């Protein structure tokens, strides 16, 4: 689906004076709930409010349960405008092309958590995982890029207050957000004004509805796995929702097969943690999901340059990914095993099973110095299509011809 952004936006609705970016997590839910329950907590009428949410397509089902049961009915009763949107497969532009409006209503009844083109799908098709280093670009692309053109459209160039759910322990995030203020946009942070930390937000929400939506994050978010406390929280949620945990492990497994250095816990593997914790329900769901997938034999080639000409430091990596054949996991592994035996007999390949338990059949192994190349074949879920940049074959051939395969052996 590639519906143009503004096709379903109610352009006749009054211009909102207050716009809330609603992430559906503990912090933003507490703000919205207090506004709905306690008119003295706000200095505006609810008719002047627009609540906007960007759906990544990968939120927890427990979040849906709480928000649909307790928040949406209150929003509908108060006539609060709620816009749900997502990005499509098409590139999102500042003008809003590529953004899909899923719902624009003052009587919302359900969350469109499924989104449109999900971040999980994007990662799987690329054969990778979200990266935990640097800026949270996945959040920018899936949320910020979706919401910005919608907010611009509904505010029509008028001044508005943009409310975000930063809690009292996030002063630095609020200060950074203030740098994005303009002549029309003013960022506001009610939890900071109320001096509420996350625990205060959770306590308030529980006092009103008896439960909490939990932290807002994609169920595979590497940032949510970044420290011991967050990992414990994620493991609890995985135990409660093993089907979602299995989808997370499927993404990681494909990324690992194509690149042994991948792993959702800062390069370390989530599957190892799940096994260490003996989470049998998750592991059973994971094995069932993996077994149900159509698989492929992938050919993976990489050209790794030297950074700044330094042979000891890896630089830019170019990758070619090709599906050579598809079928069941067992059938294709048998094929790869036979190829490995034949290649070993001829002395042209090496079958290596890493500590991740995945066997890769190497024709070229990367050297210890750069530039270098690698080429291997591996069985993995057939979720990532054939992909390589124009001219890759020419660059590959030039490297092999210039240096010879021995340079990468």
Image (tube, rainbow, N blue to C red):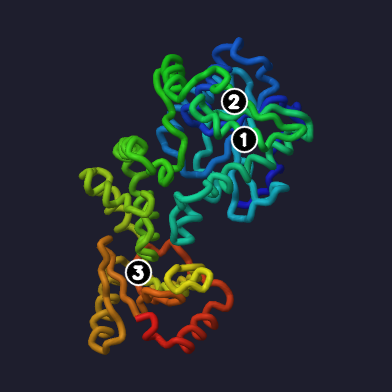
Residue 147 on image: x %, y %: 63, 40
The numbered dot on residue 232 is none
Mark 1 secondary-structure assignment:
helix
At horizontal 33% and vertical 53% (from top left) the residue drawn is 268
Query: Mark 2 or 3 closer to N-term?
Result: 2
Quarter holding residue 282: top left
Q: Pointer 2 and pointer 1: residues touching (CB < 8 Å)?
A: yes
Residue 34 on image: x %, y %: 54, 17
Quarter of the picture containing the C terminus is bottom left
Query: Mark 1 or 3 closer to N-term?
Result: 1
Q: Which residue matches tag 3?
A: 327
At horizontal 30% and vertical 82% (from top left) the residue drawn is 349
Instruction: Locate residue 282 relative to residue 53 in the image: left or right.
Output: left
At horizontal 45% and vertical 15% (from top left) the residue drawn is 208
Residue 145 on image: x %, y %: 63, 45
Tell me if residue 194 comes above or below residue 109 in the rendering: above
Give the crowd class for mark 2: few <14, some 14-19, many >=20 residues within 10 Å: many
Q: Is residue 324 visible?
A: no
Circle nearer the viewer, 1 or 3: 1
Give the crowd class for mark 1: few <14, some 14-19, many >=20 residues within 10 Å: some
Mark 2 secondary-structure assignment:
loop
Mark 3 secondary-structure assignment:
strand
Residue 379 on image: x %, y %: 33, 68
Front residue (pair 407, 348): 407
Q: CA distance from mark 2 to mark 3?
A: 53 Å
Q: Which residue matches tag 2?
A: 189
Tell me if residue 218 comes above or below residue 362 in the rendering: above
Front residue (pair 118, 139): 139
At horizontal 58% and vertical 45% (from top left) the residue drawn is 140
Q: Which residue matches tag 1?
A: 177
């Amino acid at each position: 689906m590639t519906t143009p952004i503004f096709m379903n936006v109610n352009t006749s609705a009054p211009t909102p004076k207050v716009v809330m970016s609603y992430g559906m997590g503990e912090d933003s839910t507490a703000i919205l709930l207090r506004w709905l329950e306690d008119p003295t907590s706000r200095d505006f009428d609810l008719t002047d409010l627009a609540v906007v949410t960007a759906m990544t397509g990968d939120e927890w089902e427990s979040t849906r349960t709480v928000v649909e049961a307790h928040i949406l009915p209150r929003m509908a009763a108060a006539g609060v405008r709620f816009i749900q949107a997502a990005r499509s497969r098409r590139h999102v532009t500042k003008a809003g092309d590529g953004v899909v409006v899923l719902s624009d209503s003052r009587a919302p009844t359900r969350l469109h958590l499924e989104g449109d083109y999900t971040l999980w799908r994007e990662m799987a098709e690329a054969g990778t995982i979200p990266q935990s280093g640097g800026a949270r670009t996945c959040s920018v692309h899936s949320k910020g890029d979706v919401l910005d053109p919608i907010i611009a459209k509904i505010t029509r160039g008028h001044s508005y207050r943009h409310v975000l759910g930063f809690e009292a322990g996030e002063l630095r995030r609020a200060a950074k957000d203030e740098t994005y203020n303009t002549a029309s946009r003013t960022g506001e942070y009610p939890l900071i004004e109320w001096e509420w930390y996350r625990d205060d937000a959770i306590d308030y929400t529980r006092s009103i509805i008896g439960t909490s939506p939990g932290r807002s994050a994609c169920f595979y978010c590497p940032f949510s796995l970044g420290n011991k406390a967050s990992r414990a929280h994620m493991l609890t949620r995985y135990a409660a929702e093993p089907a979602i945990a299995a989808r997370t492990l499927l993404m990681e497994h494909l990324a690992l097969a194509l690149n042994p250095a991948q792993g959702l816990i800062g390069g370390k593997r989530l599957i190892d943690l799940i096994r260490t914790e003996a989470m049998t329900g998750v592991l059973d769901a994971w094995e069932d999901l993996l077994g149900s997938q159509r698989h492929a034999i992938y050919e993976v080639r990489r050209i790794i340059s030297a950074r700044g000409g330094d042979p000891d430091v890896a630089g830019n990596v170019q990758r070619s990914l090709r599906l050579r054949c598809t079928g069941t996991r067992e059938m294709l592994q048998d094929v790869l095993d036979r190829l490995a035996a034949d290649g070993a007999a001829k002395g042209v390949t090496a079958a290596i099973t890493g500590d991740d338990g995945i066997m890769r059949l190497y024709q070229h192994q990367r050297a210890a110095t750069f530039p270098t190349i690698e080429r291997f074949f591996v069985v993995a879920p057939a979720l990532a299509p054939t992909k390589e940049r124009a001219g890759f074959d020419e660059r590959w051939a030039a490297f092999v011809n210039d240096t010879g395969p021995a340079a990468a052996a």
